[in-house]
Amino acid sequence: STLSLSDPILFLRDRVLFEDNIIFASDFIDPDRTKCDIPRILHDSIVVMVPGNLNRMFLDSRSVANRIAQILNGKYRVFFDTERILLLRRGSENALTSSFKEIECENIPKFLEKFMKDRYGDDVTVTFLNMDTIPTNGICSLSIPKRSHPSKRTSVLIRYRKENTIRVKSLTILLKRMRKVVVAKRKIKYGEMVGVDDLKLSEMDIFGMEDDVLIKIDDAIGKKARKSFRVGEIIKVSDLIDPPYVVRGQVVMAYILIGDLKITTFVRLMKDGKIGEVVSCRNIDSGKLIYGVVEEGPKIRVLVEGS
């Protein structure tokens, strides 16, 4: 039907800020462009509930417009300028994005490659995964997420105008940093002691984990695996631990000092332990539970004895 100037018209925002994870239909209405009163029913109608762990998400503008029109039984016209609506948790605006001045669309690849190399280093390889969906002429503005931890995949929002309509596209960027690092030469099981025959050096993408990789095989030998490794999987520093000095079930000498008197016995360890750690063990003769500090020898310096 033909649109009349007297028809009640609602315009949607292109960005909605939220706090309590519940977004009502009225939150999507742009009051600056909407000249009529916002219907009361929209203030009570929930359109979306945002998961608590998300600070932002996108909704299809047409779907939102159709939902609002349905709530109003088709009595209002609902219009929008962008293909998607950005939902952004209030207070996270500055933490999530960095906005840049407008640039020519044809300069997007060159600009973003320089930006990523300035941020992460010249040795980073920048690959655009869906460049064919991005406009190649005209003027556009960019918005790049800020991240507390580097991510291999980064989505950049590109805002541009086409046929008098503001549109938003998402460009996915893949970041890589190649290094020769220690990887598993064979399948390594959880709890295994890592040996020289279990490891090799291989060229791998380590972007985002630069501080947690090993570049020397010797640094991993003799360590205990805290997880299982597939063949070719990167061995990270955080996935290895030093082996215990004593192990559960091991029988060692224990002693306690009473003045100048030193009393010794033998105990069976109830848990693994390193030098300086407190472990529980059981007296071989009496069966009593003993707590003591692991010392070089190995031996246990008794702290507490209980029944």
Image (cartoon, grey):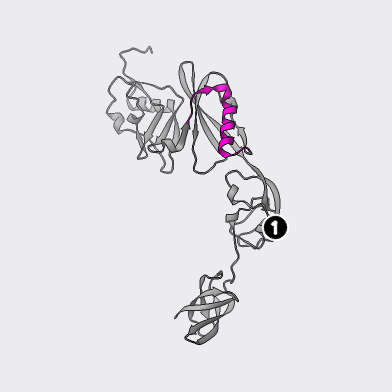
**Name of the residue lying farthest toward the right:** 197
Residue at the (45%, 35%) spot, across then down: 57
Relative depth, front residue between 298 and 74:
298
Callout 1 secondary element: helix
Q: Quadrant of the C terminus?
A: bottom left
| Picture residue at 60% right of the left edge, 47% below the top | 210
- According to the picture, the residue beneath numbered tag 1 turns out to be 198
Q: Position of residue 163 (x, y in %)?
A: 48, 15
222 shown above or below 6: below
Crowd band around label 1 with a 10 angstrom C-alpha radius: few (<14), some (14–19), many (20+)? some
Residue that appears at 68% across and 54% down: 216
Compared with 233, 2 (above or below) is above
Residue 149 x/y as whole percent: 52, 44
Q: Which residues are magenta?
A: 99-122
The amino acid at mark 1 is: Asp
Would you say 166 lies left or right of 228 here? left
Q: Quadrant of the N terminus?
A: top left
Residue 180, magenta (yes or no): no
Q: Where residue 283 sits in the image (x, y, percent)?
A: 52, 81
Q: Nearer the viewer, residue 1 or 130?
A: 130
